[in-house]
């Protein structure tokens, strides 16, 4: 038991496991906004040691080895540009993001599922253009009926989003934790108000 405690303590010293680093592409934009591109502090230090990133900001806390003390990076920028993906994967998460985490029938936010606008039982396919986020109540009410038969309408027509659209949508849903050193890098490309 003592050895197990010692090992877990060495792997995750108290408080250090909660110091993620914001990862920026070589153009100083986050690799992704939602989910926000973050690395554990260990990965950020390793990448800096291997000269793959430059450190732009640091936490007040440090980690130590017998010969070195390093402040924990809070913002790192890749030295080589990573080309953003153009193709948007058709995943539940991306579907919910496209639909702003709200039911496309009633607008309810919260516990969501997805619904086929043209039901599969009636030949509907599972695609960006035929699947929407729906709350359980609306999904159950609509069932395998058409929109007209169920007496419901869509808030907006479903369509495949571009990668840029999803990135921009992600900016509207910031994570629960935003370190102050990240703010300038998350919103630097937004137009300033006059």
Image (cartoon, rainbow, N blue to C red):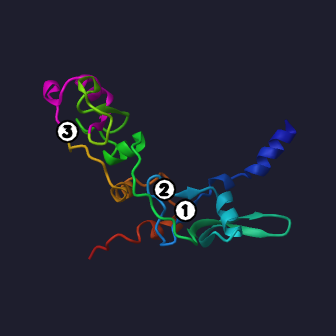
Label 3 – label 1 distance at C-alpha: 37 Å
- Highlighted magenta segment, given as a residue range: 130-153
Q: Position of residue 59 (x, y in %)?
A: 63, 66
Left or right of 84? Residue 18 is right
Mark 2 is surrounded, within 10 Å at the Cα level, by few (under 14), some (14 to 19) or many (20 or more) other residues, namely some
Which quarter of the picture shows residue 92?
Answer: top left
Q: Which mark is residue 154?
A: 3
Left or right of 4? Residue 194 is left
Q: Which mark is residue 183?
A: none
Q: Position of residue 39 (x, y in %)?
A: 59, 57
- Tell me: residue 170, above or below residue 180: above
Mark 3 is surrounded, within 10 Å at the Cα level, by few (under 14), some (14 to 19) or many (20 or more) other residues, namely some
Q: Position of residue 81 (x, y in %)?
A: 52, 69
Which quarter of the picture shows residue 113?
Answer: top left
Residue drawn at point x = 51 percent, y = 54 percent: 177
Q: Position of residue 99 (x, y in %)?
A: 30, 45
Mark 1 is surrounded, within 10 Å at the Cα level, by few (under 14), some (14 to 19) or many (20 or more) other residues, namely many
Q: Which mark is residue 22?
A: 1
């Amino acid at each position: 038991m003592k050895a197990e405690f010692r090992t877990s303590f060495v792997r995750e010293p108290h408080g250090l496991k909660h110091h993620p680093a914001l990862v920026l592409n070589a153009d100083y934009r986050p690799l992704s906004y939602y989910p926000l591109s973050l690395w554990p502090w260990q990965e950020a230090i390793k990448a800096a040691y291997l000269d793959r990133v430059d450190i732009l900001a640091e936490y007040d806390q440090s980690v130590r080895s017998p010969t070195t003390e390093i402040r924990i990076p809070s913002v790192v920028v890749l030295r080589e540009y990573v080309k953003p993906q153009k193709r948007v994967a058709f995943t539940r998460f991306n579907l919910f993001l496209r639909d702003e985490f709200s039911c496309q029938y009633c607008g309810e936010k919260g516990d969501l599922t997805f619904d086929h606008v043209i039901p599969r039982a009636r030949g509907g396919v599972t695609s960006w253009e035929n699947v929407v986020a729906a709350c359980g109540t609306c999904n159950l009410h609509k069932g395998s009926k058409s929109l007209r038969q169920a007496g419901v309408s869509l808030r907006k027509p479903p369509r495949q989003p571009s990668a840029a659209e999803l990135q921009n949508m992600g900016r509207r849903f910031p994570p629960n934790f935003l370190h102050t050193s990240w703010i300038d890098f998350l919103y630097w490309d937004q137009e300033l108000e006059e």
